[in-house]
Image: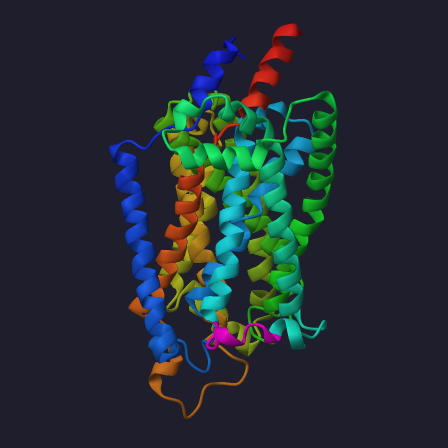
Amino acid sequence: MESLAKQQIIEDLLPQKFGKAGKIWVGILLAFCALGFVAYCLQLKNGLVVTAMRDYVSWGIYISNFVFFVAISLVGSLITAVLRLTQAKWSTPLTRIAEIIAVSAITFASIIIVVDMGRPDRFYNLFLHGRLQSPIVWDVIVITTYFFVSILLLYFPLLPDMAIMMKHKDVTGMPWLNKMYTFLGSFWKNTAGQIHISEKAINILSITIIPVAFAIHTVTSWLFATTYRPGWDSTNFGAYFISGAFLVGAGAVVVAMYVFRRSYKLENYIKDEHFDKMGKVLVLLALLYLYFNVNEFLVPAFKMKKSEEEHLMGLFTGEFAIVFWFAISTAMLIPILILITKKGRKPFPAFIAGILVVIGSWFKRYLIVTPTLLHPFLPMTDVPEVYKHYFPTWQEWSIALGSLAGALLIITIFARIFPIIPIQETITEIEEHEQA
């Protein structure tokens, strides 16, 4: 690492006020959130009839969003836990970015489930009358556990930076922020005992979050795999979901790396080598997910049972073919071709590959949900024509976009309030490097 003065590091990494572009960005996100809130109020007033969901497609774009949010939240365990435990020092500037993405995603995964309910006022019945043999109850348990472990993994490494920010009160420009820093971190004195306890707690949480993260994605896959439907009747689903989650989470981190590097001029901290290493990780994960996709479709295609045939033909050549091949190409094939070369792992090409991964992965989740429900084992008979097709209404699109905007808003506000790159860890790492 290039030698940087301690004071210079602090000045570079302290939270920065929004410029004109930042304020416009926040305004756009708030507008989408407001639109989603209005659409949800209409849904509460009139019921789920305002959606395009009917007897067959009872899980639509809301559950697609839920699966997407759960998937992208896995990045917290990938970057923070796996790379931290393997002592990959190069990941230090990325850990907080990964954790805030994880926290924002799992927050809106929880919210979108309530949105999908026709009677959210009865949500409490899940706790009063929940049955442990239900995968839905398993999902609630692991999501709640994952949320709190992710919050702690975000909070503990932030404590040393709280002390730094309290010493630079003039930077925030908002007195209430200084009070919040004092409330959250005034007990931190940076003593050897506190550092030891904090490091031990972070290691315990890093070990804990890995099986919890695997559980949340496995249980989410079981919500589908334990339901008797073509396309879901698979023992491959757990690994299929986990590999896809690693991919989209890593893609989201690459996108965030580029945006924060450009917006806050962090070229000295988020370097080309970080994009190179994350690009290699993305290629590996894309190849792994591609393998599970081949496995997922090849076996039923080889046997070609009647119900599976209708489902597969709908994906490969039928009404979902354009979306299917778009998702496969953008989530896996094109990013592999971009990132396989060293030039493709430069910041901007890697950023483009990351965007493609995230967009393609969202459509992939949509394809996991909708086509299967439109091709049940028992053929649709004596039902209105509208039941045989599904396309989200404007209310559904508004709520879905509002939830995505809400997750981005959490990340944006966090970057305004807290250092997006760990200050104390960066200082310590540079000092250790110079001593070596």
Residue 281 appearing in the image = no
Residue 34 appearing in the image = yes
The relative height of residue 115 versus residue 11 in the rendered view (above or below) is below
Residue at horizontal 50 percent and vertical 65 percent from the top: 113
Query: For residue 314, which quarter of the picture?
Result: bottom left
The relative height of residue 70 versus residue 287 in the rendered view (above or below) is below
Residue at horizontal 31 percent and vertical 65 percent from the top: 38
User: For the C terminus, which image quadrant?
Assistant: top right
**Relative image position of residue 382 (x, y in whole percent):** 41, 93
The relative height of residue 166 versus residue 214 in the rendered view (above or below) is above
Query: For residue 50, which quarter of the picture?
Result: bottom left
**Relative image position of residue 288 (x, y in whole percent):** 59, 45
Extent of the magenta region: 117-125
**Relative image position of residue 306 (x, y in whole percent):** 54, 78
Between residue 362 and residue 396, name the one nearer to us: 396
Between residue 179 and residue 199, name the one nearer to us: 179
Asked if the magenta segment contains residue 349, the reply would be: no
User: For the N terminus, which image quadrant?
Assistant: top right
Q: Most extreme residue toward the bottom, as rendered?
A: 382
**Relative image position of residue 14 (x, y in whole percent):** 45, 24
Asked if the magenta segment contains residue 118, the reply would be: yes
